Amino acid sequence: QVQLVESGGGLVQPGGSLRLSCAASGRDFSVNTMGWYRQAPGMQREWVASIFSGDTTNYADSVRGRFTISRDNAKNAVYLQMNKLKPEDTAVYYCNVYAIPRHYWGQGTQVTVSS
């Protein structure tokens, strides 16, 4: 079993920045792909970014150029640096980790972009 703990959400003005963190813990697991998703009120959960075991990254068009995903394999952690935030980025952000043979989800952290 793998547990994910997220941190770093909050309230920020448009154009501001936030950094989300997610750390995985447990016994006898091997992390492969790590990623972030988000869910706005009344909307379906959507994929934001992924980082693969070789550090290749991929981003949704809506965040490419503004968000950066990174990972620290020694800490089994994944990060999401969010810059130039927009009101439409407001959502609960969830980290997702694929630790063979299944995916795990964090509890979610609220990001609100508002003046």
Image (cartoon, rainbow, N blue to C red):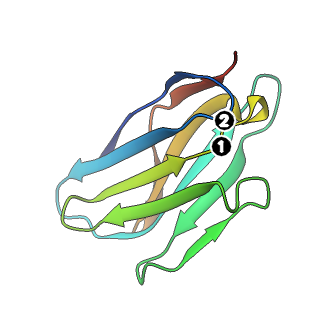
Q: As rendered, which of 45 and 110 lies closer to the eye?
A: 110
Q: As rendered, which of 22 and 30 lies closer to the eye?
A: 22
User: On residue 99, which mark appears?
Assistant: none
Q: Is residue 34 left or right of residue 71?
A: right
Q: Is residue 104 left or right of residue 42?
A: left
User: On residue 15, which mark appears?
Assistant: 2
Residue at 73% over, 60% down: 60
User: On residue 84, which mark appears?
Assistant: 1
Residue at 26% over, 68% down: 73
Q: As rendered, which of 56 and 41 lies closer to the eye?
A: 56
Residue type at mark 1?
A: Lys
Q: Is residue 36 left or right of residue 22?
A: right
* Dot 1 and dot 2 residues touching (CB under 8 Å): yes
Mark 2: which secondary structure? loop
x, y percentage for residue 29? 25, 64
Residue at 30% over, 47% down: 23
Residue 47, can we see it? yes
